[in-house]
Amino acid sequence: MKALVYHAPEGLRLVEIETPRMGAGDVLLEVAAASICATDLRIVGGGHLKIPDGVRRVPGHEIAGRVAATGPQVTGISVGMPVAVIPNIGCGACDQCIRGQTHLCPTYEAFGIDLDGGFAEFMLVPERALRQALLVPIPEGMSFVEAALVEPLSCCYNGIQAGRIAPGDTVFIVGGGPIGLMHVLLARLAGARRVIVSEILDERLAQAGLFGADVLVNPGTEDAREAVLRATDGGGADVVIVAAPSSQAMEQAPDLAAAEGRVIYFAGLPRGQDTITFSPNRIHYRQITVTGTTGASRWQFRRALELAAARRVDLSRLVGAVLPLEDGLAAFDRALSHRELKVVIAPGGSERRVTG
Ligand SMILES: [Zn+2]
Ligand SMILES: [Zn+2]
């Protein structure tokens, strides 16, 4: 089969590799769509701790496809079934897994990082992933491309939940890329009265306006702090979500939160540059909650899928380009430009919809 394989540390290559061999309890998935995430860009740039030199890995953890074959011991999943993939496999036994937070399991494995992922014609889904119900049926009418985007949406759902947005709240989102835009859509659904977005790239900032942001700030040309305080009559935003790897925005975030506001670090910072300073007094005297989110739970994934299926979030709006696997290297270049919405690789041809 054809696959995009990251040869650590040299880079990504489009190569022919053996189709994965299935065990009795495993499933073989025919990948229909897999979208490129910032994590994939970090992997192929050589920046992932879990992929040391010498390892060959098919990246891709935002995946939808059709069940191509099932092992004789597999039950509840049949050939031809359209499914989206929850990418993190927890150990199943630690406290976090027992709480349903498998994405916080200290020894979790992820498709596209620890196991081969979705940028290939086929992907092996091992028995331990099936036991955790990581294949979620795609409802009729949803395209595979949309289904692949449910994974990043589920991560944003986690961020939005941590923000505990109440109807009428003002939400300030740092970052106007696809992740920032998903936060805009979800903040609106959660009842935000006003959404402020800051973004350095002007075309992305304008796009945030089309997605429902009311106040647009370019921190490259104006003071984000002043703009947020002006838009909130000096009070600050009820919820501040930092969805861009900006240390400056992270330092500033508690200062821009209203009394009893919530600050969510959705993004992380590169290793070695991951120290920021701020005064705890702002948090103390104004009772601000500072927290972070990473990934999503299986339950949040299902919620995100339901929202997209019900068209409360139209994921098709977030698609920048759909390219065949043969153009996978070009797809990565386009994703690296950071000027497009989600770039999706569709090994089996682009816009197949799920029917019956
Ligand atoms: Zn991702
Ligand atoms: Zn665990």
Image (cartoon, rainbow, N blue to C red):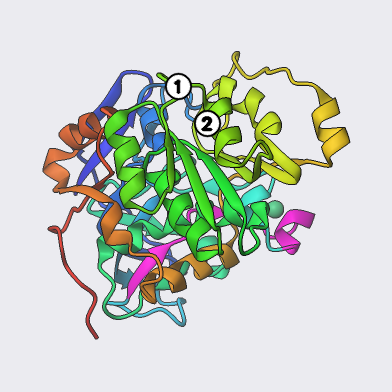
Q: Nearer the viewer, residue 16 or 266?
A: 266
Residue at image location 37% in from the left, 61% down from the top: 22
Does mark 1's beta carbon lie closer than 8 Å to ligand 1? no
Residue 258 lies, with reference to residue 313, above or below; the image says above
- Where are the magenta residues, as a range? 82-99
- Please name the residue shown 62% across and 55% down the image: 169
Could you classify mark 2 by the number of other residues whose Cα lies within 10 Å: few (under 14), some (14-19), or many (20 or more)?
Answer: many
Q: Position of residue 33 (x, y in %)?
A: 26, 56
Disc 2 marks a residue whose amino acid type is Ala
* Residue 227 marker: 2
Furthest residue in direction bottom, as rendered: 356
Residue at the disc numbered 1? 222
Residue at position x 51%, y 22% from top? 223
Q: Can the viewer see residue 304? A: yes
Q: In this rendered view, identify the residue nearer to me: 156 or 111.
A: 156
* Coordinates of residue 165 in the picture (x, y in percent): 64, 58
- The circle drawn on residue 275 is none
